[in-house]
Amino acid sequence: MTGNTTATTVPIELLRKYDRPGPRYTSYPTAPVWSEEIGRESYLTALENASKDAVAPLSVYCHIPFCRSRCYYCGCNTCIVKGDNSVNEYTDRLCREIAWTAGKLKDRKIIRQLHFGGGTPAYVGTQRLARILDAMEQSFIFDDGCEKSIEIDPRITTLEQLEFLADRGFNRISLGVQDFNLDVQQAIGRIQPQDQVSTILEQCRRLGFKGINFDLIYGLPRQTVESFTETLERVMELRPDRLAVYSFAYLPTFKAHQAKINEEELPVTEVKYELFAKAIEMFTGAGYRQIGMDHFALPDDELSLAQADGRLYRNFMGYSVQAAPEMIGLGMSSIGYVDDGFYQNISKLNEYGRRIDETNCAVYRGMKLSPDDLIRQHLITQLMCNFYLNIPVLEKRFDISYDEYFAREKKELKGFIDDKLLEVSDKHLEVTPIGRAFVRNIAMTFDAYLKGNAPGQKATYSRTI
Ligand code: SF4
């Protein structure tokens, strides 16, 4: 596998050519093809099967869906609530869900990876976070060296909260930054001075957090190539360990709060391509390794090291060193993966509360993977994470012939090979440095649900660039 140490310049004409709606592949099969026929009963069977391997470690995702106010661009499952009642009730229910799930998993107790996402997890305050963590500790066992990560909002995070998190064993942290330009911040309803971010960053470093991540967004209102370049320069000065740069999808029909954004202030598509290309060029030029189409890490960060030897993994928590393939989802809208199946909790706060009160379980949809799904899941995960598919490993693992199984897909890869986005031999597929920006497009070649080869609903996806 080749490294990526020099700046990668992605030609704008290729961005134009390959920009189309497509999945992000945080899962395969992707969430829009999951079914509501998979619910509590299926989940109970999956937990029962998962409980049989008592020594296998687990990953846990815990969703805290509250924020102080709604940023105009927000695409997350979050709620703005008044007073403490909703937050207290949610904490109680989450603790009950933790105990119920642990009970069903019987002797399977080891957690090797924990992630708190939101919303703004710290919004609930340290006392409630402590209650949730206590509930987990009563029901599960955190493995030595467990990776504990959390998303934070620099605008409301205090030193006391960071100290609490460090004290409770949190060792990874992700900061929502988006853009440092004040004009852009005003247009997205999120004022966050750079000082606030650099202070939190310094505090996180002092407290020993590793893998500190900044989330940035391109395609926001009032962003220009000049203004975004300035933001990128300031980010490079702060030099976080990891960076994610997401494309903003403006969907006011589905997300009513996005209507607060003035559509006329959004950068036109061609400018959006330039913003993305600029970010890739500057990050790779500054020594970051591109570890996903829109994720970057310093060469000595564990994600870069894991990618270099093919151990990188991707799930709903983002990229990680594969700590435990099976994941328990807790809280409103969370997603888990157990016994070769996806299980998602309901995404409405009231309904989550009702289901937990009545049955201790809020799973409302999911998917049990078929043998074909598992083959394609492996292949797509390898491409998305490691930009590399080892064909003999795939053939041995699933007892198939790659040439026969993927005869049609092999033909469809020709365009990517011609555009120098992909290199292919009898033994491997390897995404080139320029091809990394198009890895979603390459992965789509192997998605049976986009080809009409497998049953599934028609899905709406964001654009690939
Ligand atoms: S802080 Fe994050 S989750 Fe909360 S409203 Fe803003 S973007 Fe959404």
Image (tube, grey):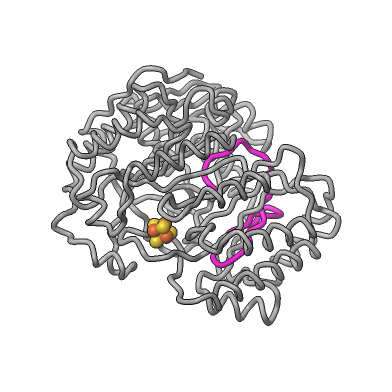
Query: Residue 153 vs residue 37: left or right?
Result: left
The vertical placement of 183 against 212, above or below, is below
Instruction: Choose between 351 and 216: the one closer to the eye.
Output: 216
The vertical placement of 347 against 229, above or below, is below
Query: Residue 412 vs residue 121: left or right?
Result: left
Residue range of the region highlighted in magenta in the rendering = 317-341
Furthest-left residue in this view: 264
Query: Residue 226 vs residue 250: left or right?
Result: left
Q: Quadrant of residue 35?
A: bottom right
Q: Is residue 324 magenta?
A: yes
Q: Is residue 325 visible?
A: no
Q: Residue at x 20, y 45 (%)?
A: 223
Q: Is residue 182 visible?
A: yes
Instruction: Choose between 156 and 428: the one closer to the eye.
Output: 156
Q: Quadrant of ligand 1?
A: bottom left
Q: Residue at x 45, y 76 (%)?
A: 82
**Spot occupied by residue 207 in the image (x, y as percentages of width and height):** 58, 37
The vertical placement of 109 against 210, above or below, is below
Instruction: Count all numbered tags in the image, as a single digit.
Output: 0
